Image (spheres, helix red, strand yellow):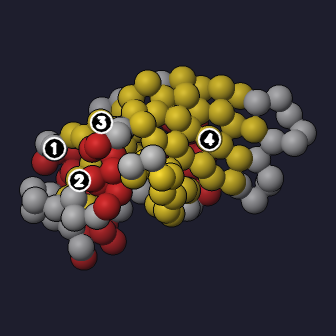
Amino acid sequence: MQRVVDYLKECGTYYLATDEGGQPRVRPFGTIHLFEGKVYLQTGKKKAVSQQMLANPRIEISAMKADGSWIRVAATAVEDDRVEAQESMLEAYPDLRRMYTPGDGNTQVFYLKDAVATISSFTAAPVEIRF
């Protein structure tokens, strides 16, 4: 699990894919955080991505490092509405405090459940990590 978080942080930007009525939606994200033994991401409740994950929590994440390796993570996104989880995320990403405040009714965090991450490259066998 820590390897996945470290990998995504090293990438800086990853791409989150959701479903909107059968149409894939992909957008760049940058928040990834380990809290209470779970991998979390953050968004705002006012955003379409929030509604998409609530309607269909099956997501995928993809990112590529400068070394040419890439990661794909398939998971179920589970909302955690606790202020403590929001606070932990905003402590890890203090720049977000310009837009979000724990308990403000907009700040939203999800953790990844039943996740399967695969790290691949053209030169090595894939590595699978389940969490």
User: Is residue 80 among the parts visible in the rendering?
Assistant: yes
Find disc 2 in the rendering and name its residue: 108
Q: Position of residue 98 (x, y in %)?
A: 24, 76
Find disc 4 in the rendering and name its residue: 72
Q: Please, what is the three-letter code of the amino acid marked with disc 1?
A: Asp
Q: Would you say 65 lies left or right of 11 here?
A: right
Find disc 3 in the rendering and name its residue: 78
Residue at position x 63%, y 52% in the image: 63
Quarter of the figure with residue 104? bottom left
Q: Secondary structure at mark 4?
A: strand
Of mark 1 and mark 4, the one earlier in the sequence is 4
Q: Name the one closer to the observer, 26 or 94.
A: 26
Work out how far the residue at label 3 is from the one at label 1, CA to CA, in angstroms: 10 Å
Q: Secondary structure at mark 2?
A: strand
Note whether 111 is above or below 66 in the view shown.
above
Q: How many marks?
A: 4
Mark 2 and 1 residues: CB-CB less than 8 Å, in contact? Answer: yes
Quarter of the figure with residue 105? bottom left
Of mark 2 and mark 1, the one earlier in the sequence is 1
Q: Local crowd at mark 2 within 10 Å, few (<14), some, or many (≥20)?
A: many
User: Is residue 16 among the parts visible in the rendering?
Assistant: no
Q: Position of residue 82 (x, y in %)?
A: 14, 42
Q: Please, what is the three-letter code of the amino acid marked with disc 2?
A: Gln
Q: Please, what is the three-letter code of the amino acid marked with disc 3?
A: Val
Of mark 3 and mark 4, the one earlier in the sequence is 4
Of mark 2 and mark 3, the one earlier in the sequence is 3
Work out how far the residue at label 2 is from the one at label 3, CA to CA, in angstroms: 11 Å
Work out how far the residue at label 1 is from the one at label 4, CA to CA, in angstroms: 26 Å
Q: Local crowd at mark 1 within 10 Å, few (<14), some, or many (≥20)?
A: some
Find disc 1 in the rendering and name its residue: 81
